[in-house]
Every structure is written in structure tokens, then in C-alpha cells.
Image: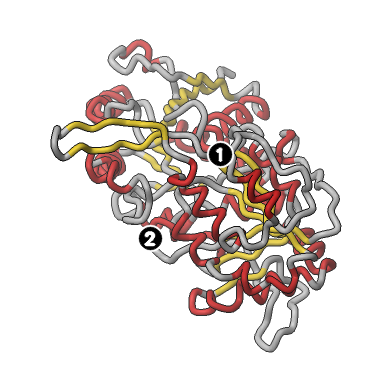
Amino acid sequence: MSKYKILVLPSDRTGVSKFRSLDPHLCLQKLYPDEFWVDIDYEPKLHNENYLKQYDLIHYHRSLHPDYNLSKKTIPILNKLGIPHIMDVDDYWLPNKEHPAYMLVKGKGMDQLIVDNLKIAQYVVCTTPIFANEIKRFCPNVYVLPNAIDPKEKQFKCNPEESERVRIGWLGGSSHLADLEILGGVVQQLHSLKDKMQFVLCGFDTRGTITEFNPETKQEKARPIKPKESVWYNYEQIFTNNYKIVDSDQHAQLMQFKFGEEYGDAHTPYRRVWTKPITTYAENYNKFDVSLAPLKHHKFNEVKSQLKVIEAGFHKKALIAQNFGPYQLDCVNAYERGGTINPKGNALLIDEIRNHKQWFQHIKRLVNNPNLVTDLGERLYETVQKYHIENVTKERAQIYREIINKH
């Protein structure tokens, strides 16, 4: 039997493509070597019909090409040649106004470009059923293939550091200030427990540039961002109660902002962990026991992936999360009205109207009950096994077979 030839067109080399383009298709070829052959091409020859005709299916993330107009011109050619094509989309096309990419997306009209691509896509793959329902407004042929984890990958192996403290951690990127502001005041409320716990902020990064506009010369000039202009400085203020929980020595060291350098004592009330590349970032889960996932209510967040749940689960972390959107898909609230604990619960969930008190209450509950931390982590680990990359790849293989045979 001849192999199905799959062409994969990632949208980047270091970011989202790891989870949506590269790892899924490398696993597909690994699990089904006699059935699928995968080519990953960053510079496809979309103008060459002979190049395109050698493939049985084309998978692309958001757009066939960085030039969205070229992508739109290529779709009719693929249709003419009878080559099925799948558009993968992992995020809502228009970030909310608080998102740092909002002005860029609106300024370049990228949200409309993505919607235009959805309207002419033959098939679409996305991360959750919530997102699928949103996409069906533009394309009826939508499949859900969630983000997946390869537990054999070193960064997803559970190997926690030892500590006498219960460590409360957050790991993420630079677009979550509005989400983390939900935690404002929580550290202060927990002051009496500061000797029993530690807040861990992972992903800290002060690199980048800022563009300044001179109103007199009408010129724009980019300069390196100053550490205290970084959103991570704002994050750190939240997790340290404006540095009130760190002593003078640690504060002096933190204010040097030396990339990669951590304060020598890992058993302090606060720990800064610098950013790591996408191939190793998840190792940071080994530095804490409880993962926080606050999420502000709006459309962009509602249709996000549940990757934070999946990562915490594979690392056997207790999870405190917003009772909203992607976190409602797999999480069962262990906290019941009246304060009883549901033995089948795998996380602690917080309704938006209780943000002002339950983040503090649930963190305190776990700090004072380390056994519950362990129990929740084990139950979440069991829950997320369906997101093992081999299980998701089996679904992917069946979807690809059906599509290719249909055409």
C-alpha cells in the first residue's frame, strides 16, 4: 500500500507550531510509518502545481503562507487539483483590547484575514469544542484535536524539587497581566503563612524593545525596554505584594535584573524563575506544587486551549483555576458548598464573582493541607491521560484517513 503524503506548513519555528504542527505530525509518522509520510516545509512552492500534486493532504496553521493574499489565491488551486487541505487555528482571531497584540492585529487587519481564511478553508482543526462552535459560523467542517503532551519528552517528566514549603506557581507568557491582576491583594492576605509557603513566578523576561514617537520630528525610534517597563515587573509586584515579602538582600538582587540569575535561597517566600525556550519551559513545573490559572472573562480567553490544565496534570500539580471556558472541560471542582471536599474532584475552581475571596481561601486551604495538594495532583494526572500525544495522534490519523479517502 502506498503511503499517504502529508505536507505540513508551520507558522513559526519556535512557538505555537511545536504543539500544533511539528510534534503532532512527527508522532503521526512515528506511530504509522507504513501509512503516513510527512514533509514539514517552511518555504513551500505554492505556485508550483507539480509540487502540490505530490501530496494527499495539506495541513497549515492559520495561513498557507505569511502573505495571506497568496494563501487565498492558492486555495482555489488546491480545490481544482482535488487536494484536501486543513487549516489549524489555536487562538481566537481578535485578542481583547488589553492584550499587547491587539493594536497590531487591528492595525494590520489580521483578524479579518484569518476570518477570510476560515471562510474558504475546506476543513478546520482547533483545540476545544468551545472554539469549534465559534468557528462553525464560518466553516462547517470543524474537527477538535486538542494540544497534546509527550510524557517521554524530558520537560514533561515529573521530577519535583524538594521543599519544606508549599510552593504556589504560575507559568506563562507576557500577555496575561489582566488575568494576573485577578490575584491582586492575595499575597497580602496570606502574609501570616509566608513562612510555610512560596510564590514562584516562571517565565520572567525583560528582553525586547519599546517604540517611542517624537511628536516634533514625527519619527519613531525603537530602544531596548527597561526592566521596570517590562510587564514581568508588574507580574512580580503582584506575586511579592510590591516586594514586601522579600528581604532587603533578595530585593537588591532582584532589582539587578540579571538574566538567568536566581536568588541563592530557593526556600524564600518568593522565587523568580527566568524564561526558558519552548523545548524546556515545562521543566519549571518541577519548582512548585500548586499551579494557578486565573482567567478574565472574555471571548479570547473563553475559546483558549486547556493546555495549562494538561501541563499541570502531567506534572501532577494541584490546580486552582477559573471556573470558565477551557478549564471547565476537564476540571471537576473538589470544593463543595459548605467546605466539604468532593473525593472525585481534580481541581479547585473559582467563579468570577468569588475572585475577591476564594483565591486566598483555596491557596490557604492547600498550604495547610499538603495531602490535598498530592491528592488533587494525582487525580488531575489521571484525567489528562487522554491528552497523551499518542492518544490524540490516533484520532488525528483517523480524521486524515477519512478526509483523504473522501477525496
| Residue 385 appears in view | no
Residue depicted at x 42% and y 37% = 225
In this picture, residue 91 sits left or right of residue 219: right
Q: Quadrant of residue 110?
A: top left
Task: Name the disc covering residue 396, or none.
Answer: 1
Q: Earlier in the sequence, mark 2 or mark 1?
A: 2
Query: Mark 2, residues whose alpha carbon is within 10 Å: few (<14), some, or many (≥20)?
Result: some
Q: Quadrant of residue 79?
A: top left
In this picture, residue 266 sits left or right of residue 75: right
Which quarter of the rendering shows the N terminus? top right
Task: Name the disc covering residue 165, or none.
Answer: none
Position of residue 294 relative to residue 142, above or below, is below
Circles 2, 1 touching at the beta carbon (< 8 Å): no
Q: How many marks?
A: 2
- Mark 2 and mark 1: Cα distance apart in space: 27 Å
User: Considering the numbered disc 1 on the image, is that residue within a helix, a strand or a loop?
Assistant: helix
159 or 112, which is in the foreground? 159
Which kind of residue does numbered mark 2 sit on?
Lys
State the residue position of label 2: 299
